[in-house]
Image: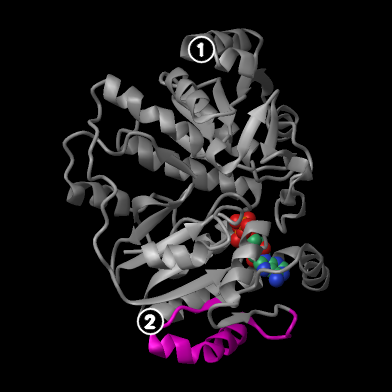
Amino acid sequence: MPVAADAAQAGETEGELYRHRSARPTGSKKGKTPPKSRTLPAADAVAQSLAALDWLRGRGARQIYFKYCSTFDSTGRGNIGPVADALLDALGESFTVACPAFPENGRTIYNGHLFVGAALLSDSPMRHHPLTPMTDANLVRVLERQSRRKVGLTRHGVVRRGAGAIRADFRRLRAEGCGYAVVDALADEDLLAIGAACAELRLVTAGSGIALGLPQNFYAAGLMQPRGDAAALPEVGGKPAVLAGSCSAATRAQVAAMAVRHPAVKLDPLAGADAGELAARALAAMAAPLERGDPFLIYSSTEPDQVREVQRRLGLERAAALVEETLARIAHELVGRGVRRLVVAGGETSGAVVSALGVRALAIGPPIDPGVPRTLALGEPRVALALKSGNFGAPDFFDKALAMLP
Ligand code: ADP
């Protein structure tokens, strides 16, 4: 989903900022947040993203940031290529970057190949992802399969020479007819240089990394001023809970670590129950810690061979929908029973949970671990959320997040 890179205009009060954030993009269904665009059918992802673009442009956004996973989660059909193509077309632009790098979390790009730690993406646990298994680490090739445009590469030898050299390379690629530059990045200093080189692009497509370099462009243009208190969140308090729907390796380690220290219950999608029944059983199993206000964990996270078995028996989409709907119902019920500090593991899972809670705007606070901030759902009731991408965070993340949520 695109977001505006210049939403925080200089001089806005916090209240004004929150009002902007909580207004709903056009095209979304009444009372629901817009669905996440990673795994929708490509045509729906394009339509949702164009609706968000319209909404942002209608409010004066100058630069649009199409943010995707740092592991470039997608399939041969999309949705990164189709959405980026459609955004370029709608903006009347012919060129942008593609850079999922997030060095602090071990996602680096070299010669157009995405690494997760020391492993190529295609050798990392992402090759087993339930919805978007990534079996090719060559991002030029991956994006070319999904896009109508030619894809080029800005190599690290150029990136390390700084923003001017990167801009010159973008001109070369444009002249060669490329619509995208996959950009190598090995460290935060590379992201800062790439961010500076993107100052004039109306569309940026990337993981969250490049955003590191963008505020400086707005400061330099006099459009924004640094604010020391931007990440401050008010205290929320209330009962804690953890929900995990990610089957990623990092989440499975976090689940194992939490389950030895706190009450935990695992959902069984093959139990023959529907989402309502599965949710009711899990909630009954956790009734005592919920009543006491002690931390507990409800999870569906499981090993890749078990995911394959569930998908074989139920079908991929039904399996995902059953688990997501169950966790979404549980989240709704938990908030109804006084939970106000909620940790959610998994991108799709987080999308399902925030939809079920009717969250339309989040205030972003300081990080818990790299790439996972504390957030506060605005609206009533106020719920502190840690929405964690499946593969992020150290093994002790759940306890740490509960301790750090306001
Ligand atoms: P991540 O951030 O690791 O990609 P997501 O929540 O985005 O995690 O995706 C995990 C997907 O796997 C979800 O669609 C979820 O419904 C599905 N899933 C979770 N647990 C199971 C399970 N036990 N069997 C089959 N699919 C599952």
* Quarter of the figure with the C terminus: bottom left
SS at badge 1: helix
Q: What residue type is disc 2 on? A: Gly
Percent x, y of residue 375:
37, 57
Q: How far separated are the C-alphas under marks 1 and 2?
A: 52 Å
Q: Nearer the viewer, residue 3 or 284?
A: 284
294 falls in the magenta region:
yes
Q: Is residue 136 left or right of residue 217?
A: right
Residue range of the region highlighted in magenta in the rendering: 270-297
Residue pictured at 65% horizontal, 13% vertical: 177
Q: Please state which of residues 325 and 196 is positioned toward the viewer in this rendering.
A: 196
Residue displayed at 47% across by 28% down: 203
Q: Which image quadrant for residue 307?
A: bottom right
- Which mark, by number, is residue 336? 2
Above or below: residue 406 compared with residue 133: below
* Quadrant field for ligand 1: bottom right
Q: Main secondary structure of the magenta part?
A: helix
For the question of whether residue 319 can be seen, the reply is no
Question: Which residue is tagged 1?
Answer: 167
Instruction: Give the answer, above or below, for where 160 lies relative to 205.
Output: above
Amino acid beneath label 1: Arg
In the image, residue 330 above or below residue 105: below
Tell me which residue sits at (51%, 57%) in the image.
Answer: 388
